[in-house]
Amino acid sequence: MAGRPLSAEECDRLWRAWTPAEVAARLSGTPPCWYVAAGWALDLFVGGLGREHSDLEIGVPRERFGEIVGALPGYEWDVVGDGQVRAFPDAADNHHQTWLRDPATGRYHLDVFREPHDGDRWVCRRDGSITLPYDELILRTVDGIPYVIPEVVLLFKAKSRRAKDEADFLRALPALNEARRTRLSDWLSRVHPGHPWVDVCTGCRDFERYPSARAAANRS
């Protein structure tokens, strides 16, 4: 079924994102199957708000999305992709993003990634050979909020390299230990060969001489 076009301006107007703490409270009765993803996950890993967030994404194994729906009654869900929006489950097999909408206001509060998996292992939707058990994929804050490891966030951010993605990379990198940098470098080399972040992760390029790092320093 054809979707309805969704502009960036409409997204800005309609999004009123919950915070990770609000989502954790609302999903406190669900089994441990979800995790904060994307930019918010990096903030939870580093500790503290690095920038303002216009939305909030969480990930969940595709087959357990119904548990999230059941825990949030009274809302409606839209499948979003290719600049269009459709009422769930239309096109759900082709797009992983599912936005929670308040039917009374039309506001969006949450974006749920329905992720591929193989039993109790997460599977990367960009390269099916990259997998991790969920107990390795998910970290938790001192308050118990689950979030995805930073390597996964940065692997997905590496594709677009928007200004906010570069800023997130530079902020998270000093907090990554050698094992996390090595894993990120390996994944980037497989999914995005020749990506400039690889040299920074492996120490082949000085962090302080990376162009985005210099730009950030000039803005401070």
Image (cartoon, rainbow, N blue to C red):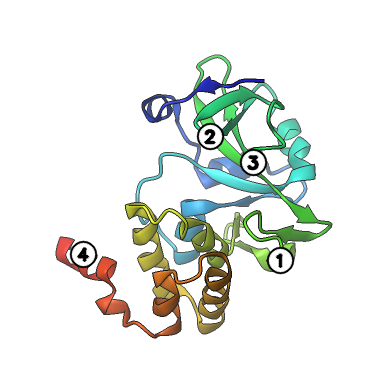
Q: Nearer the viewer, mark 3 or mark 1?
A: 1
The residue lying toward the viewer, choosing from 48 and 215, is 215
Q: Secondary structure at mark 2?
A: loop
Q: Which residue is mark 1?
A: 129
Look at the picture and state if 25 lies above or below 6.
below
The residue lying toward the viewer, choosing from 171 and 79, is 79
Q: Which residue is mark 2?
A: 82
Decide: few, some or many residues near mark 4? Use Cα within 10 Å; few <14, some 14-19, many ≥20. few
Viewport quadrant of the C terminus: bottom left
Label 4 is placed on what type of residue?
Ala
Residue 54 at x, y percent in the picture:
41, 39
Contact check, label 2 and label 3, Cβ < 8 Å? no
- In the drawing, what numbered circle is on residue 96? 3
Q: Which residue is mark 4?
A: 215
Dot placed on the residue nearer the N-terminal end, 2 or 3: 2
Cα–Cα gap, marks 4 and 3: 34 Å
Q: Is residue 36 left or right of residue 11?
A: right
Q: Secondary structure at mark 3?
A: loop
Decide: few, some or many residues near mark 1? Use Cα within 10 Å; few <14, some 14-19, many ≥20. few
Dot placed on the residue nearer the N-terminal end, 4 or 3: 3
Cα–Cα gap, marks 3 and 1: 18 Å
| Residue lying farthest to the top in this orientation | 104
